[in-house]
Amino acid sequence: MSKKDTEFRYDALNGDWVIISPKRAERFKAKGDPTHVGECPFCNIESQEKPILVYSHGIKKDVKDLKDWTTVVIPNKYPMFDLSTKEKEKKNGPYRKVKAEGFHEIIIFKDHNKDYPQLSLNEIEEIIDCWEERIYEFKKCDFVKAALVFHNKGDKAGATQIHPHSQILGIPLIDKEFRTSLENSEKFYEANAECLQCLINRMEKKDKKRIVFQNDDFVCYVPFAPKFAFEVVITPKKHSPRFENIMQKEKKSLAEALKKITSKFHTGLNNPDYNFYLRTSPFDKDYPHFHWYIVLIPRINIWGGFELGAGMEVSTILPEEAAEFLRKQK
């Protein structure tokens, strides 16, 4: 492995893998000037990596045709994973490391000044189309075990480019936190012959105190035990282990839910930096007990020594009060 290779290193004390990626540091040097659209690298899409997907107003186009593009998927110039030649895992006592092979792509929105609250439902639906198509492609690769979609808005959320964009990864392993979630869902399913998320959805809809928004296909709620203040979960009302099986009608409903929640953050929380991420079933086998979801987190709290040391988050508002506040926002 060269000094520039991205690799996984295993933490034998907690059983988790860490990504060591020297390439990622280079992205800070390439950060575009947020006040000058003409200097933004994503506005100058021709200067970026060759597109993987190109959409124009809802229509998929040839990847060589960037005329009138509205959404583009490109490889990340500074990836956490890469597609170079496989190398075997290396071990030395409790120390283990292996090259991090996988996909790391960027989904770029056309307008430099429009994030999810300002996008139209059709524009968001086009982005969801990109998620679906790329996840299907990742599944074809034996070395990819899971997919992750995430969106960072603002410095506090880790965004290094002001131009709105999401990211999608094909990951060669299942991280510890997600494994725990999958295992807990499976245990509940085996003991109760019911999906845990389906039960939570039913209880939240009945109680209504933590519901923020719902439509025909999705329910959006503040979790009973949130890790972050004003955290919101979006999840299908019907049981669905895999995001990539989403129907066209559900894409429209999901676009509405994403726009509603991010707009409520924008209006009610004074346009905060925020993250969201999508969790869907891994590719290694079927997960009938799992139910996919999206978590949205406004970055209004800063972690301190307790949160980092104890591994226990402190939310500063009751989830019922957070939900009531967000419900009132446009």
Image (spheres, rainbow, N blue to C red):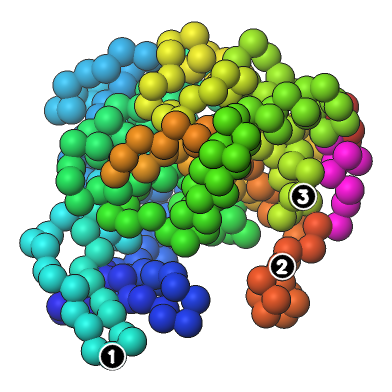
Q: Secondary structure at mark 2?
A: loop
Q: Which class describes the residues within 10 Å of circle 3: few (<14), some (14-19), or many (20+)?
A: few
Q: Quick check: marks 3 and 2 in contact, CB under 8 Å?
A: no
Tell me the mark number nearer the camera, choosing from 2 and 1: 1
Which amino acid type is marked by label 3?
A: Ala
**Residue 202 visible in this rendered orientation of the protein:** yes
Q: Secondary structure at mark 1?
A: loop
Instruction: Judge from the rendering whether residue 146 lies leftward or rightward of residue 152; answer left or right.
Output: left
Which amino acid type is marked by label 2?
A: Met
Q: Quick check: marks 3 and 1 in contact, CB under 8 Å?
A: no
Lower sequence index among marks 2 and 1: 1
Which amino acid type is marked by label 1?
A: Gly
> Percent position (x, y) of residue 93?
28, 90
Magenta stretch containing residue 322, yes or no?
A: yes
Q: Which residue is mark 3?
A: 225
Tell me the mark number nearer the camera, choosing from 3 and 1: 1
Q: Secondary structure at mark 3?
A: loop
Seen in the picture, residue 35 relative to 69 is either above or below; the reply is: below
Q: Is 73 or 9 nearer to us in this picture?
A: 9
The Cα atoms of the two marked residues, 2 and 1, are separated by 30 Å
Seen in the picture, residue 102 relative to 114 is either above or below; the reply is: below
Q: Name the quarter where the C terminus is drawn.
A: top right
Residue name at image x 63 percent, y 28 percent = 198
Seen in the picture, residue 327 relative to 145 is either above or below; the reply is: above
The Cα atoms of the two marked residues, 3 and 2, are separated by 11 Å
Q: Give the residues drawn in magenta, as a range.
A: 316-323
Q: Which residue is mark 1?
A: 93
The Cα atoms of the two marked residues, 3 and 1, are separated by 39 Å
Q: Which residue is mark 2?
A: 312
Magenta stretch containing residue 88, yes or no?
A: no
Q: Is 241 or 49 nearer to us in this picture?
A: 241
